[in-house]
Amino acid sequence: MKNTILFRPAIIAVPISLVALVVFAFVFNEARKEVYFLCGNFREGVTQESVIRQLNTASFSTFSESSLESGTQIVHSSALNFHLFRCNIELNRDGLVRSAIYG
């Protein structure tokens, strides 16, 4: 009888761990896709306002802005996938996209 009591936590922990792994994998992939597909929207000439408006719709990712000598850089990524997938958006001084690179 003592042996069956010892195995009960393992019987419960394994399915819970598997479900947690599946959920994490799903969210990880959704965050990756969000960065990828939003990055595809930012072609040369798109305004900074449009970029910010679209990035504000993201559910699984965030962005940061920094000033460059030649304009502005926006980095869009997600903590849910450890910032492995990013979109680097460079804007010129007029606030228009010069390039958007996913990687």
Image (cartoon, rainbow, N blue to C red):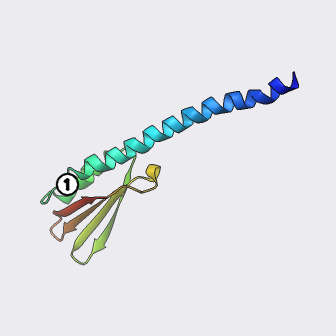
Q: Residue at x 22, y 60 (%)?
A: 100
To which residue does mark 1 refer? 42
The image shows residue 9, relative to residue 31, as above or below, that is above
Q: Position of residue 78 (x, y in %)?
A: 41, 52
Q: Residue at x 61, y 32 (%)?
A: 16
Q: Secondary structure at mark 1?
A: loop
Instruction: Pick out the residue farthest to the left.
Output: 45
82 sits to left or right of 93: right
Q: Measuring from the top left, give residue 88's x and y in whole percent.
A: 29, 62
Q: Write the residue at 55% across / 32% down.
A: 19
Question: In this rendering, would 46 be left or right of 11?
Answer: left
Residue at the top extreme of this rendering? 1
Q: Position of residue 70 (x, y in %)?
A: 21, 75
| Apparent side of residue 6 relative to residue 66 in the rendered image (left or right) | right
**Amino acid type of disc 1?**
Phe
Q: Is residue 26 above or below residue 8?
A: below
For the C terminus, which image quadrant?
Answer: bottom left
Whether 58 is drawn above or below 1: the answer is below
